[in-house]
Amino acid sequence: MVLLLKVMLVPALVASVTLAARRWGPRVAGLLASLPIVTGPALLFFAIEQGAAFAAEAAQGALAALVAVAGAGLAYAWVAVRASWGWSLAASWATFTVLSVVIHGVRPGLVPALVAACASFAVVPRLLPAATGARATPRPWALDLPLRMLSAMTLVLTVTELADRLGPGLSGAFTPFPVALTVLLAFTHAREGAATSIRFLRAFFTGMWSFAAFCFVAALALVPLGRLVGLLLACAVVLPVHAAVLWWTEHTRSPGSGQL
């Protein structure tokens, strides 16, 4: 049953974000990708297979790693201005790995991890390069959606199967970036160009506040409330925080600033 969920749930969520991007563009895709579409199911799998305490520590690891996610996205964007998606992805992964190892060594507490994550999402969007150029219109490719789904399934299977060896901290750290952002961002860049991938990232970082809230509540609630109630409570905070951040962004953005 758990294996079936791994094979079906995450690829279905990635497919949904992909189809939304085709319909409404990179801004909506980035906002949807910032929801815990992979970390949420991964924490569920950890809780079922490893226990609530393991999942709670993994949630804290994921929260701490969000600073590395911000750094990885920034590295991707600046390399993408001058290089292909392959070089951009390599720079992004290298940045994420280095920052994750450093953060894992520091082992910040739950509240410091939340503060650091929120600070990074406030600062990094201001450091992204300008998204110059129109959105490229990709030619239809029948394998695009299946490959995205296969990539997402492979990555989530790898992370959850290596959980025993990685431990809860590193297992959690690897759920937010290599699984969701890698698949969606690299495919967006390859198919629609660097400018579209930067627009995607700008919206992605705007929505990541709710991701941080999800991880924070999950880390707090999983052990005392149990895996089901703990994860449901964490999910319940996502949409209100998402809506509040979007409202704030829209009402504080200057009239000539354009898209997120």
Image (cartoon, grey):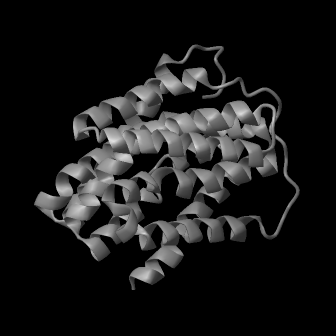
Residue with the most extreme bottom position = 1
Considering depth in this image, is 4 or 155 the residue closer to the camera?
155
Image quadrant for the C terminus? top right
User: Is residue 256 depicted above or below 30 in this figure?
Assistant: above
Q: Quadrant of residue 226?
A: bottom left
Q: Position of residue 64 (x, y in %)?
A: 36, 42
Considering depth in this image, is 196 or 161 the residue closer to the camera?
161
Q: Position of residue 222 (x, y in %)?
A: 20, 59
Q: Left or right: 140 with respect to 147?
A: right
Considering depth in this image, is 250 or 179 the residue closer to the camera?
179
Residue with the most extreme right position = 139
Q: Position of residue 137 (x, y in %)?
A: 85, 47
Q: Left or right: 2 with respect to 94?
A: left
Q: Residue at x 52, y 46 (%)?
A: 97
Q: Residue at x 38, y 68 (%)?
A: 165
Residue with the most extreme left position = 224
Viewer can see residue 155: yes
User: Is residue 108 depicted above or below 45 in this figure?
Assistant: above
Q: Residue at x 23, y 39 (%)?
A: 109
Q: Residue at x 73, y 39 (%)?
A: 196
Viewer can see residue 25: no
Q: Left or right: 97 with respect to 39?
A: right
Q: Position of residue 94 (x, y in %)?
A: 60, 44
Image quadrant for the N terminus? bottom left
Total marks shown come to 0
User: Is residue 217 depicted above or below 195 in this figure?
Assistant: below
Q: Quadrant of residue 146?
A: bottom right
